[in-house]
Amino acid sequence: MSEDDGPRRRLGRREVLAASATGAAAATAGCVGSIFGDNNSENELSLSDFRGSGPFVSGRPAPDGTSMDDLDDLSGTLSIYIGGGEGGLYRGLIELLQQKYPDFDAQLKSAPSTQLANTIIQESENGNPRADVFWSIDASSLGLVANAGYATSLPSAVTDPVPSELQDSNGRWVGVAGRARAIPYNTNRFSASDIPNKVDAFANQERFANSMGWGPTYGAFKSFVTAMRIMDGREATKQWLQGMLDQGTEEFRDEYFVSRGVATGAVSAGFANHYYALRVKAARENPPIDLAFTENDAGALVNVSGVEIIEGTQRSDLAGLFAEHLLTAEAQEFFATRAYAYPMIAGVQPVGDLPTIDELNPPELDLTELSDLEPTLELMREVGVL
């Protein structure tokens, strides 16, 4: 990403907001033990190996839940297709797993999530599936593979700890880290009470004219618009997009830059996944940025990074065990404190002052439906957002 804080071009305006994601249901098994104790061998890891650093970590309690030490060792070779902008971060967790399990060899292929989903489908259609596991940045790409028939049912040990709304209704993929749509706002320009609790309001209130920022080319934004189209219909979604354009919304290259633009005052508020505002807070001293969330609408969408096992793999047992490891207390602490994501298990808390899932009101939506992306892209092009 470049260092340009400003908007790329004027569009129209919009807000969208967001719901937050979730700390989840789960089979907790008591405080994580030996892996968070003193190192006794070169392969033993401590809490600091998994936990991030910075302003949101001080005073955090030890995570609770199933520990990696409660599971069988990872051993063997696993082909993992890992997609999305978080791929570099997720590689850090895989490196820790390989450090803990010297006999585990993760062979990684990285690319944008949608590209990898199409690659998996093509390879499978050609009778030559090469991936054992697909780890995607969002549910829409997981849904593409699952709906094409190339994802197997996951073991109950993988699906049971995660809330039903954060996994495929047919058990073909499961969330491992949550991301809530949110409204970052500049606290010098707005107060929490100024931010509406419905996304529709941003398209028709004068106070938000020429003050909002968005990243319409960003995948998370497209998923949000897809959710709106599914829930509210094409015409209502078109009217909202046009209303935001008429409001003079500023376009940024992605949602990190939206959030940074809010903090610098380039815009007064915007639409972004929740964790980008936290990254801005971690990088700057007391930036004037906070988060608000809408309720029971597409703006309150909680999406996930998740995993699925590819149909035809000869390593299904190892793939399932790998997925279990992503839902341990150690891995969930990694996602929470390094990616600022919402944990998927109950024993690990979100960082900072993020609201819990009980304090939010996301819409009822099968996230697999977000894979129906092409009608959304057509609509966005028709309106002139893309």
Image: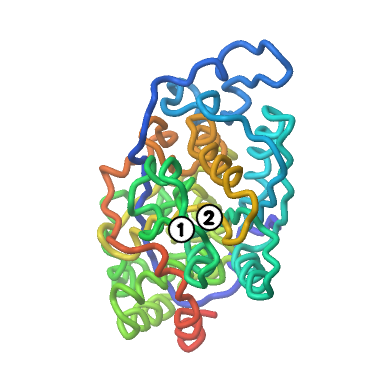
Left or right: 111, with 320 as reference point: right
Q: Say which element carries label 2.
A: strand
Disc assigned to residue 308: 2
Q: CA distance from mark 2 to mark 1?
A: 6 Å
Position of the N terminus, as image quadrant, is bottom right
Looking at the picture, how far across and down is residue 174, in whole percent?
45, 51
Position of the C terminus, as image quadrant, is bottom right
Looking at the picture, how far across and down is residue 323, in whole percent?
54, 44
Q: How is the image coloured?
A: rainbow
Q: Amino acid at mark 2?
A: Glu
Q: Nearer the viewer, residue 228 or 205?
A: 228
Q: Is residue 333 above or below residue 172?
A: above
Q: Earlier in the sequence, mark 2 or mark 1?
A: 1
Circles 2 and 1, Cβ within 8 Å, touching? The answer is yes
Q: Residues within 10 Å of mark 1 (few under 14, many from 20)?
A: many
Q: Nearer the viewer, residue 176 or 221?
A: 176
Q: Residues within 10 Å of mark 2 (few under 14, many from 20)?
A: many
Quadrant location of residue 167? bottom left
Q: Is residue 328 above or below residue 290?
A: above
Looking at the picture, how far across and down is residue 350, in whole percent?
42, 36
Left or right: 91, with 231 as reference point: right
Q: Amino acid at mark 1?
A: Arg
Q: Say which element carries label 1.
A: loop
The residue sitting at 26% across, 51% down in the picture is 193
The residue sitting at 66% across, 40% down in the picture is 94
- Name the residue tied to disc 1: 172
Q: Nearer the viewer, residue 375 or 328?
A: 328
The residue sitting at 54% across, 45% down in the picture is 320
Count of numbered labels shown in the rendering: 2
Left or right: 118, with 174 as reference point: right
Looking at the picture, how far across and down is residue 330, in whole percent?
53, 30
